[in-house]
Image (cartoon, rainbow, N blue to C red):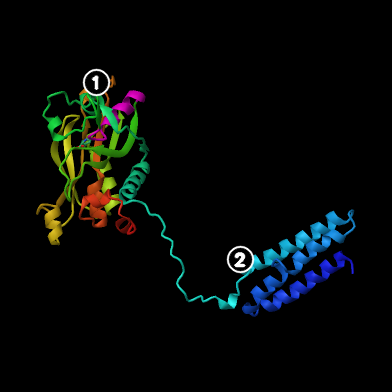
Amino acid sequence: MSLLKKIESIQKEFKAELSSATKDSSKISDLYNKYLSRKGIVSDLFSQLSNVDPKDKPIVGQKINALRNDFEASFDKLGTAKLSNKNISNLDFSLPGNHFFEGSIHPITRVINDISDIFKSIGFSVTSGNEIEDDFYNFEALNIPKHHPARDMQDTYYLNNEKLLRTHTSASQIHFMEENEPPIKIISPGRVYRNEDISVRSYCLFHQIEGLYVDKKVSFSDLKGVMEFFSKKYFGENVKVRFRPSYFPFTEPSAEMDIYWGLESESDYRITKGTGWLEILGCGMVDPEVFKSVKYDSSLKGYAFGIGIERIAMLKYGITDIRLLYEGDIRFLRQF
Ligand code: DAH
């Protein structure tokens, strides 16, 4: 029988055997071995290729290749191709498998992403600033001159006489305004640093999301509306918020926004210092002095805000020690 005929009859035989093996899965691996193992029928066909007339070799070779591909595809469909040398009936499917842990999104990143999505949905673009700044961007241009008491509010890490680690994301407002013309509608999330005593509630670095909106007509009620919109989207429609007058050198008037957290448990008392309210952001109308320092027209109006991320992450995920967020302990991170 010529090799071509043989190939045809093997193909037919295989089809018949395969259809009976699919009814009895214990036969599948035998069938695989019979046709596709190193000493199987297909490999035997390849070894007979050397006896074929050289001019027919390419055709016959192609046929055998096609046959092998066809067989492999049939086994692939059954999901058994990889079982070549194992006997499927010896596998115990009730044994536990190897467990591979998937990575997860860090809670800080998750909060930043979720909040950014809310602001993006109402037209804010996301930018980023620099973690290393100088006195001008972190203080001076934000209307915090040298010897201003507000500098004491933020204990700064200086890298040398000129450079420092930014103490707030507000520094990125200045860069953005220097590089872009109004109108401006941005948020700028990032890491900030302060030389604070490390405890369950404070750490030497943390994260903020800065927001800035500048245009011809912007009012404090626009700011309130947007902050309320954000709070409802993030904490739920029923969230209660309140604005308290506050002071920041770069905004006038300035406010802080609290959300009502409740007083149901002992920890609610502790977190909210017995008031039920929790401060989550600072905000206000951009001070004209800030526009001056970036050479903007003083008739412009704008609002700005700075949201503290760690506090929100701790509330949202019930994290009681801020340090857990930075230690990279896999037992903690796996829960997210
Ligand atoms: N930079 C302030 C801080 O770190 C937060 C802040 C308050 C940012 C008011 C603002 C703002 O943009 O308008 O405490």
Q: Is residue 5 magenta?
A: no
Q: Secondary structure at mark 2?
A: helix
Q: What residue lies at 64% left-to-right and 73% top-to-bottom?
A: 29
Counting from the top left corner in percent of width and height, residue 263 is at 13, 58
Counting from the top left corner in percent of width and height, residue 100 is at 44, 61
Q: Is residue 94 above or below residue 110?
A: below
Counting from the top left corner in percent of width and height, residue 336 is at 33, 57
Q: What residue lies at 24% left-to-right and 35% top-to-bottom?
A: 168
How packed mark 2 is, by other alpha carbons closer than 10 Å (few <14, some 14-19, many 20 or more), is few
What residue did someone put label 2 on? 82
* Image region (quadrant) for ligand 1: top left
Q: Is residue 308 above or below residue 2?
A: above
Q: Which residue is at the front of the view, 84 or 332? A: 84
- The span from disc 2 to disc 1 (Cα, nearest Å) is 70 Å
Residue range of the region highlighted in magenta in the rendering: 166-181
In the figure, is residue 45 to the left or right of 77? right
Which tag, 2 or 1, sits closer to the chain's start?
2
Name the quadrant containing residue 269.
bottom left
How packed mark 1 is, by other alpha carbons closer than 10 Å (few <14, some 14-19, many 20 or more), is some
Name the quadrant containing residue 142.
top left
Res 237 visible:
no
The single residue placed furthest to the left in the displayed view is: 274
Q: Is residue 112 above or below residue 305?
A: below
In the figure, is residue 211 to the left or right of 287? right
Q: What residue lies at 27% left-to-right and 25% top-to-bottom?
A: 300
Quarter of the image for the N terminus: give it. bottom right
Q: Which mark is residue 292?
A: 1
Q: Which three-letter amino acid code belongs to the residue tagged 1?
A: Lys
Q: Which residue is at the front of the view, 278 or 66? A: 66
